[in-house]
Amino acid sequence: MQISSRFTIAVHVLICIEAFKNERKITSEFLASSVNVNPVVIRRLLQQLKKAGIVEVKRGSGGADIAGNLSDITLFDVYNAVESVGEGQLFHFHDNPNPRCPVGKNIHNIMDERLREIQEAMESRMRSITIKNIMDDAYQYINS
């Protein structure tokens, strides 16, 4: 599978932005300390999320905030913002199946449609889960 950690880091970042927005300025350094990565990783993700209209970022040490309503941002929106997986490309096939093998020469005919269906099902489920849903769950753990 080709989903990188960028997706889960981006969700982590959004949870932190929302959870701490009234307590402190949300900087890339602060977010990086929570995720335990280099602030450069966070800055790149914030730029991708900003380009997608999910966050607002003020230059310098101005901090980050979520743009819009948490109920309007889905996991699919975040996934689309930070992952470069195209339609039907979640799964990566090995590059050179043997064309002389009956399985090798037909593996795409055997698997492509099923893999496309799996990706569509995953993306459909991601569209049904909002950042608000995630925050509701997060508050149960954060506040306990």
Image (tube, rainbow, N blue to C red):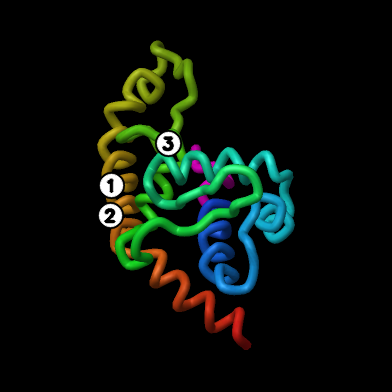
Q: Tell me the crowding category of disc 1: few under 14, some 14 to 19, or many 20 or more residues within 10 angstroms, Cα based.
A: some
Residue, disc 2: 124
Residue drawn at point x = 57 percent, y = 59 percent:
12
Which residue is at the front of the view, 110 or 66? 66
Label 2 to label 3, Cα distance in Å? 16 Å
- Does 56 lie within the magenta span? no
Asked which secondary structure carries label 1, the reply is helix
Which residue is at the front of the view, 119 or 86? 86
Q: Tell me the crowding category of disc 3: few under 14, some 14 to 19, or many 20 or more residues within 10 angstroms, Cα based.
A: some
Amino acid type indicated by mark 2: Ser
Name the front one of labels 2 and 3. Answer: 2
Q: Which residues are magenta?
A: 1-7
Q: Earlier in the sequence, mark 3 or mark 1?
A: 3
Q: Main secondary structure of the magenta part?
A: loop
Q: Are marks 1 and 2 in contact (CB under 8 Å)?
A: yes
Decide: is 139 above or below 45. Answer: below
Asked which secondary structure carries label 3, the reply is loop
Q: Are marks 3 and 1 in contact (CB under 8 Å)?
A: no
Amino acid type indicated by mark 1: Glu
Label 1 to label 2, Cα distance in Å? 6 Å
* Quarter in which the C terminus is drawn: bottom right
Decide: is 17 above or below 96. Answer: below
Residue, disc 3: 91
Residue drawn at point x = 41 percent, y = 17 percent:
101
Side of 84 where 128 appears, left or right: left
Q: Are marks 2 and 3 in contact (CB under 8 Å)?
A: no
Q: Earlier in the sequence, mark 2 or mark 3?
A: 3
Residue, disc 1: 120
Q: Where does residue 83 sit, x and y in percent of width and height?
A: 46, 39
Residue drawn at point x = 65 percent, y = 54 percent:
27
Amino acid type indicated by mark 3: Phe
Q: Where does residue 133 sit, x and y in percent of width and height?
A: 39, 72
